[in-house]
């Protein structure tokens, strides 16, 4: 017989400063990911070109979304 274990932990709501900090960190991470993808695409061949093209499109969509969220909160983006 299998027993199911459930890990219980307290869900803590983040304050506004932590949310803004996470948003800015996510923007920087996406920007770094995009730079790495652009560099990798320069050396891609065959099917990898399509792979990197889709990755770029997805990361740009994520970046645009995060920028809009930051503008709504009137955050200063580096």
Image (tube, helix red, strand yellow):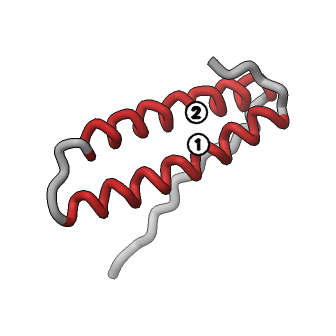
Expressed as whole percent of the image width and height from the top left, the position of residue 56 reads 43, 50
**Location of residue 15 by image quarter:** top right
- Which class describes the residues within 10 Å of circle 2: few (<14), some (14-19), or many (20+)? many
Contact, CB < 8 Å: mark 1 with mark 2? yes
**Location of residue 4 by image quarter:** bottom left
The earlier-in-sequence mark between 1 and 2 is: 2
Gap between marks 1 and 2 measured at Cα = 6 Å
The residue closer to the viewer here, 22 or 47, is 47
Q: From this view, report whether residue 62 is shown above or below residue 27.
A: below
Expressed as whole percent of the image width and height from the top left, the position of residue 27 reads 58, 33
**Location of residue 32 by image quarter:** top left
As drawn, is 55 to the left or to the right of 27? left
Task: Say which residue label 2 marks.
Answer: 27
The residue closer to the viewer here, 77 or 41, is 41
Expressed as whole percent of the image width and height from the top left, the position of residue 57 reads 48, 55
User: Could you say whether the residue bearing mark 2 is in a helix, strand or loop?
Assistant: helix
Expressed as whole percent of the image width and height from the top left, the position of residue 65 reads 67, 47
Task: Say which residue label 1 marks.
Answer: 63
């Amino acid at each position: 017989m299998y027993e199911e274990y459930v890990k219980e932990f307290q869900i803590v709501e983040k304050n506004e400063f932590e949310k803004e900090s996470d948003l800015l960190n996510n923007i920087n991470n996406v920007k770094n990911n995009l730079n790495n993808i652009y560099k990798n695409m320069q050396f891609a061949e065959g099917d990898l070109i399509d792979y990197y093209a889709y990755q770029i499109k997805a990361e740009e969509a994520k970046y645009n979304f995060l920028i809009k969220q930051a503008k709504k909160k009137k955050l200063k983006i580096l």
